[in-house]
Amino acid sequence: MTQAPTQPVSRRKPMPQPKPGGRVTLAHGGGGQLTDELVQNLVLPRLGNTLLNGLLDSATLPATGDARLAMTIDSYVVQPWRFPGGDIGRLAVCGTVNDLAVCGGEPMGIALSLILAEGFEMSALSRVLDSIAEAGREAGVSVVTGDTKVVGRGQSDGIYITTAGIARVPKGRTINPRRVQPGDVLIVNGPVGEHGLAVMLERELPQVTSVLRSDAAPLNGLIAQLIESVPDVLFMRDATRSGLSGVACDLARDCGWRVTLDEARIPVRPEAQHAADMLGLDPLEIANEGKVVAVVRPYEADAAVAAMRRHELGKEACVIGHVGGVSDGMCELHTVIGGRRIIQKPYGEQLPRIC
Ligand code: MG
């Protein structure tokens, strides 16, 4: 008679459990500290691995030989689905292309998943699809696979989109915050805060007329031009949810050095500042969809700014800060009036559903 196999003793640590009765809030989707907590406490203990744990905009996977592929995915739930300067379709393509490009990837194809509500107008859907096609042409990338689902009337409010993307990563590109050292310089390709503020104005104060428009744009052309002039870009991130402050705080945490932003040098258009003042928001914390922060060695800063300025989407590129010699992983703002203060990643959600 054979003996029944004994149950193997599990050596795995018990998984961290959420607080009893805890529920997801809108703020968990804001890309701020609460999103970080959700990812660190619930997602990574269960799904974490060497690729996912880096929490970069894309994962870079080894392919055959020296080849590497970057892969990314994002969902878009912006409300309203169209806004000055774009719509959910343009946003979905730009967001995915940009997450690939900031990791050094050259986009090869996009997967598109549409979740539509019963009753959503066909004319609106056509318009979104036209925007997807147009943004794809601008980026030089096509939708190569996709899926469509419809949920019942009232079970969602119109249209949600998920886009995934894949890109080839040329040999020798290592874009990683851990390469950043004291003395390195932060550059942005233009004025900040415009996407989130344009969506918020449209949603909250539709009676206000403004020239403010979303900056949603595919950045792969600009980034290719930058890398051509300065091949050794150390780190890049598109300043989406939680804005420029969020990128600077994440960079400081991940490189371990103090990052200093110089407020007087950060470009903010008057109409964006005006909208931010009306809504009681800080433009540095607002999402952009066509802005990249790049970190380069100090002796390459001029060449990097010049390379960006040669591109249509980088005409107002400039240096906005630097990495200092204090190893505390904090982010500091030198204010316009000469003050200094530590800035933190926004906690929760000032602006629900802006992307
Ligand atoms: Mg990103």
Image: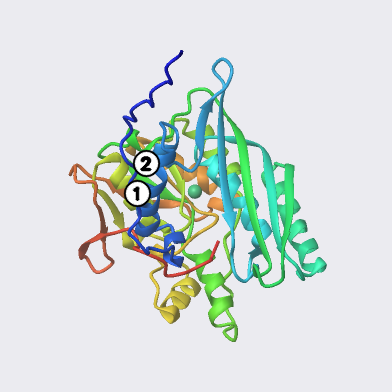
Residue sticking out furthest to the top: 1
Q: Position of residue 160 (x, y in %)?
A: 65, 60
347 left or right of 4? left
When asked about the image quadrant of residue 284, the answer is bottom left
* The residue carrying mark 2 has its beta carbon less than 8 Å from ligand 1: no
Would residue 304 be seen by someone viewing this image from the given angle? yes
Question: In this orientation, which residue lies closer to the viewer: 281 or 336?
Answer: 281
Residue at the image point whose x is 45% and y is 14% from the top: 2
Return the mark for residue 116.
Answer: none
Residue sticking out furthest to the front: 1
Q: Position of residue 256 (x, y in %)?
A: 25, 41
- Please name the amino acid that badge 1 sits on: Asn
119 left or right of 284? right
- Report, in whole angstroms, how far the alpha carbon at label 2 lies from the one at label 1: 7 Å
328 left or right of 119? left
Q: Are marks 2 and 1 in contact (CB under 8 Å)?
A: yes
Return the mark for residue 41.
Answer: 1
Residue topped by disc 2: 45
Q: Position of residue 169 (x, y in %)?
A: 55, 29
When asked about the image quadrant of residue 33, the answer is bottom left
Q: In the image, is residue 226 above or below residue 21?
A: above
Q: Please tell me how crowded label 2 is: few (under 14), some (14-19), or many (20+) other residues with Cα within 10 Å.
A: some
Q: For numbered disc 1, what is the local secondary structure? A: helix
Residue sticking out furthest to the bottom: 207
175 left or right of 114? left
Would residue 235 be seen by someone viewing this image from the given angle? no
